[in-house]
Image: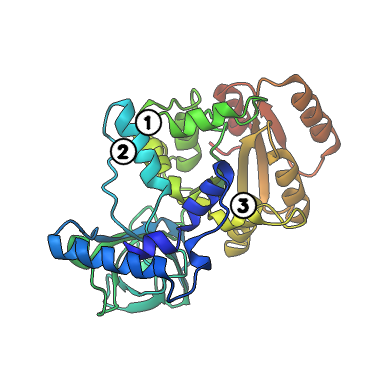
Amino acid sequence: MREKRLEMSETSFLMSQSFLEIPYTAKNLSETSITERIFRAEDAYFYAVGWFKKDKLQLIAFQAYGTDSHFYARGRALEDENIDLSEKGFFNLITNTWKRFETDEVKNTSIEVTLSDGRVLSGKTDKNGYYRIDESITNLRPLTNEEGWLSYEISYSDVELRHEIQNENRFPGELLIPSKTAKFGIISDIDDTILHTGVVSSLKWRVIFNTFFKSAEKRIPLEGAADFYHLLHNGKSGNEANPIFYVSHSPWNLYRYLELFLTGNNFPKGPILLRSFSDFRKRNHEKPQKQTEVLNILKTYPDLPFILIGDSGEKDADIYIEIAEAYPKQIAAIYLRSVNHRRKMQRIRDLIENHKTTPMLVVEKSEDAIVHAKIHGFI
């Protein structure tokens, strides 16, 4: 596949830069170089003998959020690598891990979203295969269910695509518009908040091992987290349908992996907000992607208070305190799950002692947060 050889995917390039020394790339060669002619001849030969097979195309719709007058959809157009996250065995795990990151993007191609009432919205993928459809459109709430989820279909609209497309070119997507019964929202970190990753470990290989060498089904959630989140989702009345948003520093390549973990461990359904690899190259003075996502949610729902949940190991405390001081009327409480790190915990206690704007609690176990939430009338 000439495009694969001459233009490395964004993910493959980043991985290769980390582990290999690349003195030159084929992209540096001229358009009429001998190397490229060889690639062209080789591809033609593969087509002739039937060895070359194109993967089918797919569209992965990330669960997103919006309002009655704001449709916002994100996702990615990819060739299907036949990733089966339910496959057992170490070899299958390694193979699927590689496939999640060695992606073949469908770049700069037209797509369209069809709503259940027949309205159609158009968009286009970028150079990395990502799409973002951000439209002002009225009367979206009548299209939602009792939990606030709006279902739609997304498809390729480029008639010149030469690949076969899966699912008869009809892919499902969902958008969350918080129910009118919601009293507050919940924004939760994932890493070491509901899923043990070892991100605070001085041995960072634990993060790599837990993420890449353990299946989603074998990852164990922190005890009591799912039950606590269901209590928050249901609220004090038991039927509030309070929206939950999951944020993480993980790349979008892990979207399905994290979705499977959350579903398999009975966490309430909610948008999973990750980041692209380009966000890893942000300069130090720019706000972290996680912080940007939280701020976007607050601005989208200015009349809805929020509970922020994170851990005490990395930057959650600093980010949440900064947000609470900027939006004091919107942050109802902050919960930080305690991590086993004495120096970090002392720093967090000092931060909490100096923060008076919002109720803030470091929890050793989920029962601590449940007691606090009952006292404050959240559940």
User: Which color mode does the image show?
Assistant: rainbow
Amino acid at the residue labelled 1: Ser
Q: Residue at x 30, y 33 (%)?
A: 92
Asked if one can make out residue 130 in the rendered structure from this viewpoint, the answer is: yes
Residue 379, given in percent of the width and then of the height, sits at 53, 36
Asked if one can make out residue 376 in the rendered structure from this viewpoint, the answer is: no
Which residue matches tag 2?
85
Residue 215's disc is 1
Characterize the local packing of mark 1: few (<14), some (14-19) or many (20 or more) Cα atoms within 10 angstroms: many
- Name the N-terminal-most of marks 2 and 1: 2
Q: Nearer the viewer, residue 9 or 370?
A: 9
Residue contact at pointers 2 and 1, CB within 8 angstroms: yes
- Look at the numbered disc 1 and give the secondary structure of its residue: loop
Residue 38's disc is none
Q: Residue at x 39, y 54 (%)?
A: 103
Which residue matches tag 3?
280
Amino acid at the residue labelled 2: Leu
